[in-house]
Image (cartoon, rainbow, N blue to C red):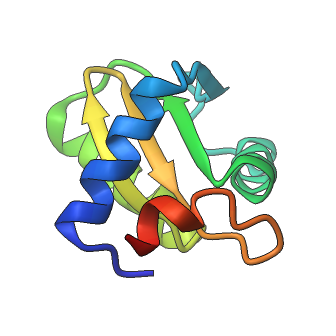
Amino acid sequence: MNLTKLQIKRLRTESQRLKLKPVVIIGHNGLSDNVQKQIDSALGFHELVKIRIPSLEKTTKKSLTDSICTHHQASLIQSIGHVIVVYRYNDKSDRFGKILSN
């Protein structure tokens, strides 16, 4: 799903307003199958998810973030320090429909 800058801004604001905590924490072993399943499950249930990634070089962190977004068909909303915020639309719950439609 391609999001506009305004939609990304609204989702970033919503993640801060909800005071989301990282739901998935990636260890130094990286993206194992179990971690991928956790991310998929969390995105399916919550739509907007914070993920804590290990301390890595900037380029490695970027490639890890890109692979997460590509693998799960999600959009990167925010990346600060070792925490990223990722969004994937779920038509069953449509939790953030009002925020994204206005």
Q: Is residue 89 above or below residue 81?
A: below
Viewed as shown, does residue 37 lie left or right of 61? right
Give residue 99's position: percent from left, percent from top: 46, 59
Residue 1 locus on image (x, y percent): 45, 81
Q: Residue sitting at 36 percent across and 55 percent down?
A: 76
Q: Is residue 1 above or below residue 54?
A: below
Q: Residue at x 61, y 70 (%)?
A: 89
Q: How many marks?
A: 0
Name above or below for residue 78 compared with residue 57: below
Using residue 92 as the reference point, say whether residue 58 is left or right of it: left
Would you say 85 lies left or right of 8 here?
Answer: right
Q: Which quarter of the rendering shows the C terminus?
A: bottom left
Identify which residue, 34 or 80, lies in the foreground.
80
Identity of the residue drawn at 44% across and 38% down: 14
Foreground pick, 22 / 95: 95
Does residue 34 appear to the left or right of 49 in the view shown?
Answer: right
- Counting from the top left corner in percent of width and height, residue 77 is at 34, 50
